[in-house]
Image (tube, grey):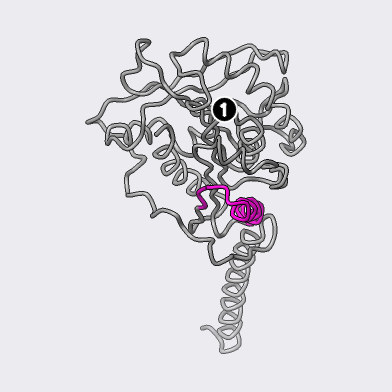
Amino acid sequence: MITRGYRWLLVWLGGWLVLVAVTEASNAQERKRQFGGPIVLNPDDVPAFEEPPAGFDAPRDDIPHGQLEMVSYESKTVGATRKMQVYTPPGYSEEKKYPVLYLLHGIGGDETEWQRFAKPGVLLDNLIAEGKAVPMIVVMPNGRAQKNDRAEGNVFESAPAFAVFEQDLLNDVIPAIESRYSVQADREHRALAGLSMGGGQSLNFGLKHLDTFAWIGGFSSAPNTRPPQELVPDPADAKAKLKLLFLSCGKKDGLIRISQGVHAYLKEQEVPHVWHVDEHAHDATHWKNTLYHFVQRIFR
């Protein structure tokens, strides 16, 4: 028979366990919110687009499919053979010239990260079948330009290699793609975009090389992003050359201040751009959804 005191002890322990669980959940949410720093939203930090429809990234059997392959290339920049994933659209033919999107990953990823997060090939198969995206080649290289380019150990120690990738991209990756695939090899038919560290790379490299890229996207851009005045030192030149500059971030992302700063500067300098802030955090859902919106607006 349970005594009154023992029953009281069980109730007390149960209440204490509930309190611990609630507190830990609250702390976890706060840690997530504080990733990168406090979040302060501005009046124009709002979605530019609606959430993608359900099933937008689900494979379909009733449409043509593109091909995804792992490609090796020689990197003179790194002094090694490196790898990148390449998507070619349905019906790819050497008789036609295609635009190319170079799509960059984050600091903890590699050439397979976008495929794990978003399945760009499936997403594009669906959009191309619906006439919502131009048939394009998508190149997903490894943005960690060093001989051991695996995302292992303390990945933050490899941050300098992401800066070196500028030369690998321009001097090794792009020439390799343009020698192997039937592409339109001019700035109007090259796009550069990425997530997190890759978003910073895309802004840093793309805006610095507007004679190479006309379409640029930074999704949840990381602290490697250069200050806005360095990104766009000549707003008039950017206005004249950019076909699309696309910035996005989730309103629960502690790194949002970086993209907010770029957006504010571009707005002040009257440089046309898209500013999209959705309901998500620094996560795969934001990147997948943003890719869906971005690829529909390039090469048009």
- Residue 27 drawn at (x, y percent): 64, 66
Q: Nearer the viewer, residue 228 or 46?
A: 228
Q: Nearer the viewer, residue 235 or 263?
A: 235
In the rendered image, the vertical position of residue 97 relative to residue 272, given as above or below: above
- Residue 213 drawn at (x, y percent): 56, 29
Residue 37 falls left or right of residue 250: right
Q: Which quadrant: the C terminus?
A: top left
Give the structural element (helix, strand or loop) at label 1. loop
Point 74% across, 35% down: residue: 159
Toward the left, the furthest residue is: 62
In the rendered image, the vertical position of residue 122 relative to residue 12, given as above or below: above
Point 53% across, 47% down: residue: 272
**What residue span does the magenta drawing correspond to?**
254-275
Point 62% across, 76% down: residue: 16
Q: Which residue is the site of mark 1?
A: 111
Would you say residue 5 sits in the magenta stretch? no
The three-letter amino acid code for the residue at tag 1 is Glu
Q: Callout 1: few (<14), some (14-19), or many (20+) C-alpha neighbours within 10 Å?
A: many
Point 48% across, 22% down: residue: 86
- Residue 263 drawn at (x, y percent): 60, 53
Number of marks in picture: 1
In the rendered image, the vertical position of residue 52 relative to residue 6, given as above or below: above
